[in-house]
Every structure is written in C-alpha cells, then in structure tokens.
Amino acid sequence: MFDTSLSWGDIVFLAQGAGMTLAVTAVSVIAGTILGIFCGVIRVQLGPYWSIPLTFVLDIFRSVPLLIQLVLANAFQSIAKLGWPPFTTSCVVLSLYTAAYCTEIVRGGIDAVPLTTRRAGRSLGLSWWQDMRFIVAPLATRVSLPSWIGLTLGVMKDSALVLWLGLIELLRASQILVTRLQEPLFILLICGAIYFLISFPIARLGGYLEKRWSPND
Amino acid sequence: MIEIESVHKSFGKLEVLKGINLTVNKGEVVSIIGGSGSGKSTLLTCINGLEPINSGKIKIDGTEVHAKSTDLNKLRQKIGIVFQQWNAFPHLTVLENVMLAPRKVLGMAKSDAEAIAVKNLTHVGLAEKLSVYPNRMSGGQQQRMAIARALAMSPKYMLFDEVTSALDPMLVGEVLDTLKMLAEEGMTMICVTHEMAFARDVSDRVAFFHQGVMAEIGTPEQLFGAPQNPETQKFLASIR
C-alpha cells in the first residue's frame, strides 16, 4: 500500500524544516511574550487614555496580515541596509506580532485581578513591585494562560509564512518534497502530523497547569 | 495617636468629606456609624493613604500621611486595615496569606514569619485551617484570616471597614467576637460599622457621620442615649 519514493534523507529534510519552525516560534514567542508583558503592564499603568499611541501601534501589528508585514519588513531592512538575514527579519516581525496580541492578554489578566485584592496587598505595606510580583502576577497568569497557549499555537502555525522570505521551515520543506516526489497527500499528511506532534505537548502543558491551579481558585 | 485635621476629600465634583476633625488616642476604640455615602469608609482609606485628600492633614504618630516625603509602604506597617470584602489572596494558603507581608515587607526569615502567622491565626481561631486555600472557608473564616493577616504586621492601629457587612448573619458573631477581643487587648481601633450593639458595647467613643460631616461624637451612652443632633436622632430612630 505504501509505495512511496520518500527516502530517509527526505525525512531528515522535513525534520530540519520542523527544527526551523520550532526555532522561529521559540524565539518569537519568548521575545514577544517578554515585550508583551512589558507593554501590557505599561498599558494598565497608563490607563486607556494615555496609552492610545501604544495601542495604536500594536493595533497595526494585529490588523495588517502577517504576510504583508513580513514582506514589508524584509524590503525595509534591505532599503535601510540593515543586512538582516531572513531568520532575523522573520523573528523580529513575528515577535512584534506576538507582542501585540500578548499585550492585550496581559492587560486582560491584570484587569481580572480585583482592585480590592490589590489594595489589601498594598495596605499590608507591599510596594507596587511586590504587589505585582506576589499577587498580580500569579493571579493574572492563571487567567491569561489559556489565551497565551492559544497564541503560541497560532504563532507556530503562522510561522509557516516566513517561507516567503526564503526560510525552509516545515511547510516549505514539505512543498519542496511535493514538487519533487509528486506525492502531495502523503507528504502533507506527514507534515500535518509533525505540526500536531509539536502542538500537542504545548496544549497538554496548558491543560496540566490549569488543572493544577484550579482547586485553589 | 491618629490626628485628623479638617480633611476634605472629593471624588470629581462630589465632595465626600467636608472638613473632618478627629483625634484617636492610643488604646482608644472609636466606632463610626452613619448612612451609606456619608464618607465613613472613605475616611479610613484616606487614613492609610490609599486615597489622596484634597486638603487638611492626617497625622499618624506625628507623621503626615499625605506628605510627599512620607514612605507610605513603611507607614502602612503601623496601620492594619480590614475591608468589607475580605480580599483573601486566592492563590495562597491561609498560612501563606498571613506570612506574605512579614516575609516580603519586613524581610523576616521563613521560620519567624511562620511562627508569627501561626500565632495570629490561632488567636483568631483558625489554627486548624493553616494549609487550606481561602475558597474552602466560609466568609467569616476568611474575614478572620484577613484580620490575622493585618495583625501579623504588628500594627499599632487597626482600621475596620464594615467588616461584617458582607457576611451571612450567622457568621457576623464570630468576627465581632474577634474585634471585641482585640479591643479588650488594648488595640487602638477605628471601626466603621453598621452593628449598633457592637458600637455601643465596645467603643470608647462613637461618631455619627452624615453627608461628609461628622455630625456628632460622644461616648456610647451620650450618642445612643441622648443624641443631640437631629440627624443622629433621625438615623438612630430609623434603624431601631
């Protein structure tokens, strides 16, 4: 039944593509989350009025299709003679894209911590930073986790678009094999299975943490 | 000593405190009664600097609360406050709730903070609940935990903001008993309350607030027995 010309070398080629997908995703999600937490806290501290400029910039990253952002950023870095390799450009764009979404997730999480709870903390003498660190952060994390897991999985799949800058990630690797071997269904099946294998542990980790925290809430 | 001198406070155009003067001496228990919106609770949040004031002065042992040079985080260690909503930290156990501030604010070692937490929780009758999460307890128990949490900082003053208002009637008693116990131990307390029997039994002085003004203040006998101000008379008549 499985009469395929897919060779062992091709599997390694796909695995390398998956490695690239993982690398782009990991860098972007980590950088984007750090930036998103930073922007989210600023957004809450400034209030809706003073953070309008920040929100506006982030809205651009959220509303312009990622593909356009990638192409424009690549053109920009080339015009500005920054000399960024496609990997850097991809990570920068995806990080900003992640940060834009993450900011809203963080803001929502912080807003979900009742002001009265925070007041109780401050009234005990906790500083703003201690209140953030020991009360707001743990509670906001619980609220934000499901959305953040969703964002991470989304970014991983969206990262396929970096193939337009010439990076050979999982989807691009599959396309190359499809073109060469003319076995699209079989290869895309494998490609999809690999995406699933990467996503599944992340989704389960989220489920596990939610379950672990839930009896306390 | 807590000295409140002609304090004015507005939320936008709404003036909620219109020149409050009150001095609370060490060891004294002062209850504040009055209708909703009379400014009672606002005064408490101003006393520990959670709310800014528009004019006037509040001094705690001579330190001006709203002066720019005042380190509020430090000042607040002297003043415990317990709110109507008990505001447990839901991600921490009862013991951890009480240990948090001594450890992080006072920088105590874990074992010292734990000893203090256990002592205060035992004091309010929660010795058996140390490793329980707050959501597993009744409102009355959570409120007593909040009192222990404030006491763990060894405050000189305690402010109670309608601490029994959000409780089931059957749970009010246990919290009031805890407050009575503190009063008998000589804690300086300001209690905003709707529990008239409590105000009468425990307070050294009772103040009646009406529309942002302290309409009357006196001993419980004077205020409940022979109120002078017509608004006080009206209020007391309405709740009897």
Image: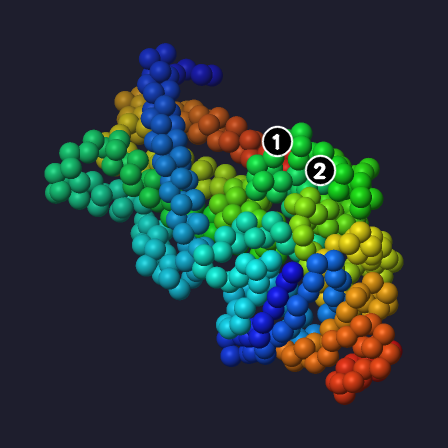
Q: Is residue A19 left or right of residue B38?
A: left
Coordinates of residue B175 in the picture (x, y in percent): 81, 55
Q: Quadrant of residue B20?
A: bottom right
Residue at figure coordinates x 75%, y 37% from the top left: B118
First-in-chain label (1 vs 2): 1
Q: Residues within 10 Å of mark 1 (few under 14, many from 20)?
A: few
Residue at figure coordinates x 81%, y 82% from the top left: B227
Q: Is residue B91 left or right of residue A185?
A: right
Residue A142 numbered mark, or none: none
**Mark 2 and mark 1 in contact (Cβ < 8 Å)?**
no
Q: Quadrant of residue B2?
A: bottom right
> The residue under label 2 is which amino acid type?
Ile
Q: CA distance from mark 1 to mark 2?
A: 11 Å
Residue A174 seen anywhere in this rendered image of the structure: no
Q: Which residue is mark 2?
A: B116
Q: Which residue is mark 1?
A: B109
Q: Is residue B209 left or right of residue B67?
A: right
Under tag 2, what secondary structure?
A: helix
> The residue under label 1 is which amino acid type?
Ala
